Image: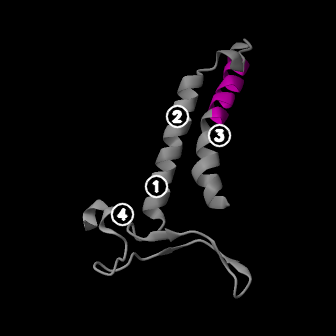
Amino acid sequence: MLAKALTIILPVALPFLVYALYLKYAQAKSGERRGWAKAPWLLIGLSAAVLTVVSLLIFRVLSGEDPHSVYVAPSFDPGSNQILPGHMEQPPEAGTDDRPRSLRPPAER
């Protein structure tokens, strides 16, 4: 959950929080009350999107997983009657892939 907060929620919320602090500062300094109606919404939205993409890229690079590893989705094990969590696995060795050639990544064709 912390990873989701750091990679998605914080980067989206940060530009809005910075603008809110700017509004408080500007109001305290000039006494003029400015609201959110004239906010630079495009700039705030674009900066939120850029921060989210950057945080996802950083998380991917610093996660410690092999870039070629394959994500295995959570699954149900009927034998133990439990849900197995999602995890990363190493891809199969070259030549042992039983997928049709058209379904393999371009580098393996």
The total of numbered circles placed on residues is 4
Tag nearer the camera, 3 or 4: 4
Residue corresponding to mark 2: 47
Position in image of residue 10 (x %, y %): 63, 46
Residue corresponding to mark 3: 13
* Nearer the observer, 32 or 3: 3
Q: Which mark, residue 90?
A: none
Magenta stretch, residue numbers: 16-29
Tag nearer the camera, 2 or 4: 4
Rendering quarter of residue 107: bottom left
> Which secondary structure, mark 2?
helix
User: What's the residue type where badge 1 is placed?
Assistant: Ile
User: What's the residue type where badge 4 is placed?
Assistant: Leu
- Within 10 Å of disc 2 (Cα), the crowding (few <14, some 14-19, many 20+) is some
The mark nearer the N terminus, 1 or 3, is 3
Rendering quarter of residue 11: top right
